[in-house]
Image (cartoon, grey):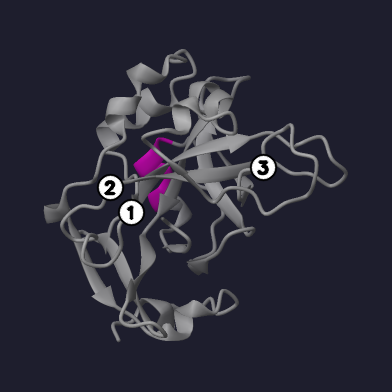
Amino acid sequence: MCGRFNQTASGEEVAEAFGLDEAPQLAPRYNIAPTQSVAVVGVQPQTGRRGLARLKWGLVPRESLGDERGFINARAETAWEKPSFREAFARRRCLVPATGFYEWQKIDVKHRQPWLLRLASGRVFAFAGLWEPPAGLPGAVPTCTILTTDPNDVARPIHDRMPVILDPNDYARWLDPAVTVPAEVRPLLRSFPAGLMTAFPVSTAVNNPAFDDPACLAPA
């Protein structure tokens, strides 16, 4: 799964990486947790240009009857056919910029060691995401989820799932609103090459979602 990540790239770096017309105002986030606001990149229907929006992390289907936490992750292998994600997979795909993500390695019954996984280059990248409009409830807001897949050789010793990190060459295809047939984008949802990633243990301070500090990035 992917239950925590960081995004410390500047607005200028994000604009360059994702083809935005303007650099957004982005504060560094060191420990992004579910239900918090996250920046996502999508295609603006009015202009056909890419834009950045802030959505709540935890996709709540529009037919939902309550203000629930929502789905923070969706399995890439099945999301395209699941009722909660099927429409979003076909028509509301997005990119979730990140500079790293955290996974917890089970040490024993009581202890789990957090690890930070990121690109060896240190550059910003994109998770494959889906988004949903407000559920029609009082105070409802747009929400999103992150797709997950089988782990690569870097992630496998730590966890049995990892978020889908898209190849930059696939951004346009993933975001293309004209592509509504799942089979045309499902091949993009694969494990990212392990040789381009790195991982190291970090402090258990990251366990606290309220702790949003550069210390989250320091090797343990």
Residue pointed to by mark 3 = 60
Q: Is residue 83 left or right of residue 160?
A: right
Q: Are marks 2 and 1 in contact (CB under 8 Å)?
A: yes
Secondary structure at numbered mark 3: loop
Residue 197 sits in which quadrant? Answer: bottom left
Residue type at mark 1 is Arg
Question: Crowdedness of circle 1 by 10 Å Cα count: few (<14), some, many (20+)?
Answer: some
Q: Which residue does the image show at 43% across and 15% down from the upper left?
A: 179
Q: Is residue 83 above or below residue 110?
A: above
Q: Quadrant of the C terminus?
A: bottom left
Q: Position of residue 49 (x, y in %)?
A: 51, 25
Secondary structure at numbered mark 2: loop
Question: Crowdedness of circle 3 by 10 Å Cα count: few (<14), some, many (20+)?
Answer: many
The secondary structure that dominates the magenta segment is helix
- Given the current orientation, which residue lies at the most extreme front position? 109
Q: Which residue does the image show at 11% across and 54% down from the upper left?
A: 195
Q: CA distance from mark 1 to mark 3?
A: 22 Å
Q: Is residue 14 magenta?
A: yes
Residue pointed to by mark 1 = 161
Residue type at mark 2 is Asp
- Given the current orientation, which residue lies at the most extreme left position? 195
Residue pointed to by mark 2 = 150
Residue type at mark 3 is Val
Q: Is residue 187 left or right of residue 63?
A: left
Q: Position of residue 90 (x, y in %)?
A: 50, 21
* Stretch in magenta: 13-19
Residue 61 showing in the rendered view: yes
